[in-house]
Image: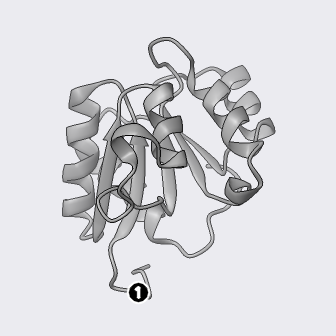
Amino acid sequence: MARKNSKPLTILHVEDDDNDAILLGKACERAKLPAVICRVAEVEQAKAYMLGLGDFLDRQQFPLPQIVVLDLKLPGVNGLDFLNWLRALPEFANLPVLIFTSSLSRHDHAEALARGASSYFVKPASFEALVQMVNFFQLPDAPASN
């Protein structure tokens, strides 16, 4: 389903793997999803981005995201801790957070949803499957789980 609005979707991608970040961008292009992807590699950068601090002070250059795509396995503080932090801030309570991880763990899946993730995706093995997942970003109301 195409987005009703042709304005690009702003995505904060919290991902430490360069290849995964590049693939997400290319998948958005292939899916014809107009998106601006702002990528950070660690949780402290993601927090600064969300609060508009330090390097992320300029909201013209670093707008608040409409979706956060969050990896769980990050250096230092993990993605679940960032999710806890984000959900504790009332202004971000309803911001869609899509977990995008290589973890097949049922515990990780359940824990992410319990902490407020909107959806949980296991990174697919093929690029075409990734493009199909990106199509989910275009839906107006995301379901609670994949």
**Where is residue 41 shown, x and y percent of the image?**
36, 28
Answer left or right for 3 relative to 6. Answer: right
x, y percentage for residue 115?
77, 36
Counting from the top left corner in percent of width and height, residue 35 is at 30, 65
Q: In the depicted view, which residue is nearer to us: 22 or 44?
A: 44
Tell me: residue 119, above or below residue 136: above
Name, please, the residue furthest toward the top: 76
Residue 79 versus residue 113 in the image, above or below: above
- In the image, taking residue 95 as reference, residue 62 lies left or right, namely left
Q: Is residue 125 above or below residue 36?
A: above
Instruction: Count the marks.
Output: 1
Q: Nearer the viewer, residue 5 or 50?
A: 50
For the point 67% across and 55% down, the residue is 92
Which residue position holds label 1?
Answer: 5
Q: Give neighbour class at mark 1: few <14, some 14-19, many 20+ (Cα, 10 Å).
A: few
Residue 87, relative to residue 32: is it above or below? above
Q: Secondary structure at mark 1?
A: loop
Displayed quadrant of residue 13: top left
Q: How is the image coloured?
A: one colour
The quadrant of the image that shows the N terminus is bottom left
Residue 29 left/right relative to 133: left
Q: Position of residue 84 (x, y in %)?
A: 72, 33
Give the left or right position of residue 112, taking residue 11 as reference: right
Residue at the location (53% across, 36% down)?
A: 47
Residue at x-position 62% and y-position 31%: 82
Give the residue displayed 27% in from the left and 65% down from the top: 31
Amino acid type, mark 1: Asn
